[in-house]
Amino acid sequence: MSLELSNVSLIAPGAEAALFAPLSLSVAPGETVCVMGPSGVGKSSLIAHIGGHLPRGFRTTGTITLNGGDLGALPAEKRGVGVLFQDAQLFPHLSVGDNLAFGLRAEVRGRAARREAVANALEQAGLAGFETRDPATLSGGQRMRVALMRALLAQPYAILIDEAFARLDTGLREDIRAFVLSHIAASAIPALMVSHDEQDALAADRVLHLAR
Ligand SMILES: Nc1ncnc2c1ncn2[C@@H]1O[C@H](COP(=O)(O)OP(=O)(O)OP(=O)(O)O)[C@@H](O)[C@H]1O
């Protein structure tokens, strides 16, 4: 199902004017839309708003619909939105396998079934056998692949990507971007990707420029 934004805008705490002109957008299942725009226009805040993590004091207009429901009525953990950040944000105190198991939905019951789901995800990420590894021992690209698999194991209705590839080396960035975007397309969920990188824009299905 599509991710639908209708007349969405944000007013930062203490500000009078909206950060960007009201935004209406429909992102289709399997489609990736790249959101670009000048620094400070509100790209990360838009991602935070959709995910339900907007800092206190922001005012918002418009509506966001996902999976047929109004996201504004739901707390972050009930929105079914997965977010990929720049530093992958794996839990440092959990093994790679436990990070993935954290993403698994509660419906996957039983130790054997959960272990198998984690092993499958690692296999898909090209990281078979990495269950007991400490996330700190992974490369940036490996961490990002685990972060994507953790997000997908939760079977989200949409994925948001906030400059997730920016800190990776150029060659690796291309591989990881292709890995992430192909998994999103295969999962048939809509994705919104915030970026400054022209290469990200080229890899997306569509580009949207946020303007004041
Ligand atoms: N917690 C906050 N309190 C007050 N203002 C904030 C807060 N978070 C963000 N802002 C303001 O909201 C505006 C948009 O910030 P945001 O980080 O969303 O922009 P951005 O387009 O992602 O920028 P960049 O490209 O530099 O990452 C900025 O003017 C910023 O100062």
Image: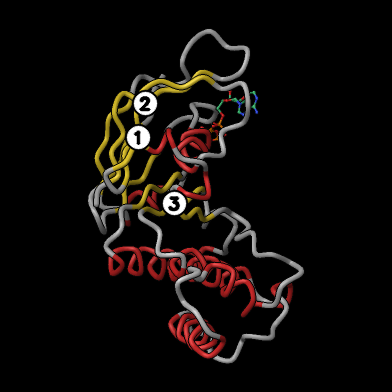
Q: Assess whether mark 3 and mark 2 are in contact (beta carbons under 8 angstroms).
A: no
Q: Rate crowding at label 3 as few (under 14), some (14 to 19) or many (20 or more) other CA atoms within 10 Å.
A: many
Q: Earlier in the sequence, mark 2 or mark 1?
A: 2
Residue 2 appears at what percent x and percent y? Answer: 25, 48
Amino acid under disc 3: Val
The residue under the point 44% across, 71% down is 175
Question: Image check: 134 left or right of 203?
Answer: right
Q: Is residue 114 above or below residue 157?
A: below
The residue under the point 41% across, 19% down is 212
Amino acid under disc 1: Ile
The residue under the point 31% across, 38% down is 65
Question: Image check: 201 left or right of 126?
Answer: left
Mark 3 C-beta to ligand 1 under 8 Å: no
Callout in the foreground (2, 3)? 3
Judging by the rendered image, the residue that carries numbered circle 1 is 64
Occupied quadrant, residue 89: bottom right
Q: Rate crowding at label 1 as few (under 14), some (14 to 19) or many (20 or more) other CA atoms within 10 Å.
A: many
Q: Earlier in the sequence, mark 2 or mark 3?
A: 2
Amino acid under disc 2: Val
Q: Assess whether mark 1 and mark 3 are in contact (beta carbons under 8 angstroms).
A: no
Judging by the rendered image, the residue that carries numbered circle 2 is 8
| Mark 2, secondary structure of its residue | strand
CA–CA distance in space, label 2 to label 1 = 8 Å
Residue 33 appears at what percent x and percent y? Answer: 31, 47
Q: Earlier in the sequence, mark 3 or mark 1?
A: 1
Instruction: Name the foreground residue: 188 vs 192.
Output: 188
Judging by the rendered image, the residue that carries numbered circle 3 is 81
| Mark 1, secondary structure of its residue | strand
